[in-house]
Structures are given as C-alpha cells and as structure tokens.
Amino acid sequence: MRVAALYDVHGMPWALEAVLAQVDADAIVFGGDFLGGPYPDETVELVQSLEATLIRGNADEADERFASLPLTVEFDGVTYCHATPTSNTPITTAITPDDDLRAMFGDSGTFVIGHTHHQFDRRVGELRVINAGSVGMAYESDVAAFWTLVDGGEPRFMRTPFDIDRAVAAIRASSWPGAEEFVAENLLVAVSRDEAVQHFESLR
C-alpha cells in the first residue's frame, strides 16, 4: 500500500496543489497543521475535496471543525501522528537523543510524524521514527513542498516545487496579519535546516 503523508500544509494551498498533482498513492494522510497560515479556508476546501484521512495537529485544535480529529491513524502497521501518538506538541528532530525517542514512542514500531518541518528517518533498535516534512513551511534550506510517500512501510522522501511568486503575490494581497513576516521568513529565503534543528532541540 502506498500512502502519501502530507503534513504541515499551514494554509498554503499553492504548495498543496503542486503536491497533489504529483501524488500517486492508495491513500492520503494529512498529518495535522493544515491550518495556521495565510489561506486556511482555501486549504481546508482543498483538503475536504479529497478522499483523505485527517489527523489533528496543534494548529488545528482551536478550530471547532477539527478539534475532535484523532491524534493517530494506522495503515499497514505504520502509525501516523502529528508529534507523538499521545500528544501533538512534543518535539522530535533529526538529532533528538535515542533515549528520548524511546521515551516518547516506545521501544518498537514505525511512526510517521511532522511538527518540526524537516524530513528524517531515525532508527533505534526496533523503533523507527520518520518525519514526513512540511508541505507549506519547510525547514529544509530550500523553498519547496516536502512530503513523504510511504510504500509498503518504507518512506520515500519527496520534494515538489511550487509557484513561489504566485504564493507571494497572493499572500501580500491578503488581509492576513502575518503576511509580510511569513513571506519574508519562509518564501523569499529558505529556512536553514541546521538552524531549525538546533532551535527545536533547544526548546525540548
């Protein structure tokens, strides 16, 4: 079974549209945080037009439509969750200590997460933690949409370009209060992966 794991869209329908044009999968999982960005209504409309499974991210909890979404879903023995199976706020990065991974996820199993917006594949004994990346707000030293195709339980990290100029123009034309800051910090420059990882680790 092929599962497209689309996480952390953050109100960026232009990035999501580009990804969906590439998706060839048996199932789509939206791993939380499709809200929390410049165009949430358009993003929700696009998400709801699909036959997809939704789980709850921390950015979605304030919206009554999505506050009751589950924290986890399972396909082919792989557990999909936003941050951990029991909470959508704990931080996991590419360099989180092995013992902390076990404390959050247990000693075994395969988990696909998001929340920290950078792709990685961590193995600690029988435990595997995969970060699918972020469709709409990637911290990958590259401005693009990042997602993961899980094929038979094995991840294939994906990178999809999108029309950045179109997104910038639309966001700047909106009435969203965070428009200029979002454009300046996420679209006109690429967020450094290494700096983001170090920052997240400092918050743990």
Image (cartoon, rainbow, N blue to C red):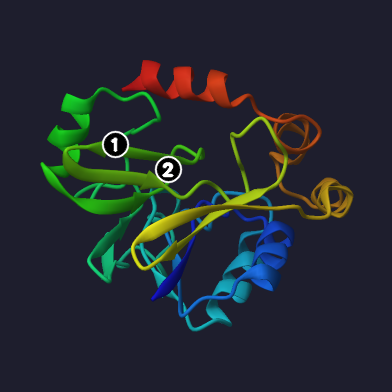
> Could you say where residue 76 lies in the image, as x and y percent from the top left?
27, 71
Marks 2 and 1 in Cβ contact (< 8 Å): yes
Q: Quadrant of the N terminus?
A: bottom left
Element marked by disc 2: loop
Residue 189 to residue 198: above or below: below
The kind of residue on which mark 2 rests is His
> Could you say where residue 111 lies in the image, as x and y percent from the top left?
28, 52
Element marked by disc 1: loop
Residue 90: mark in rendering:
1
Taking the image as shown, residue 100 lies to the left or right of residue 30, namely left
Q: Would you call the spot at circle 1 few (<14 residues within 10 Å), some (14-19), or many (20 or more)?
A: some
> Could you say where residue 39 lies in the image, as x and y percent from the top left?
68, 58
| Sequence-first tag of 2 and 1 | 1
The kind of residue on which mark 1 rests is Pro
Query: What is the CA distance from the residue labelled 2 to the residue labelled 1?
Result: 8 Å
| Pointer 2 residue | 115
Q: Quadrant of the C terminus?
A: top left
Q: Would you call the spot at circle 2 few (<14 residues within 10 Å), some (14-19), or many (20 or more)?
A: many
Figure quadrant of residue 18: bottom right
Residue 82 to residue 150: above or below: above
Q: Nearer the viewer, residue 174 or 118?
A: 118
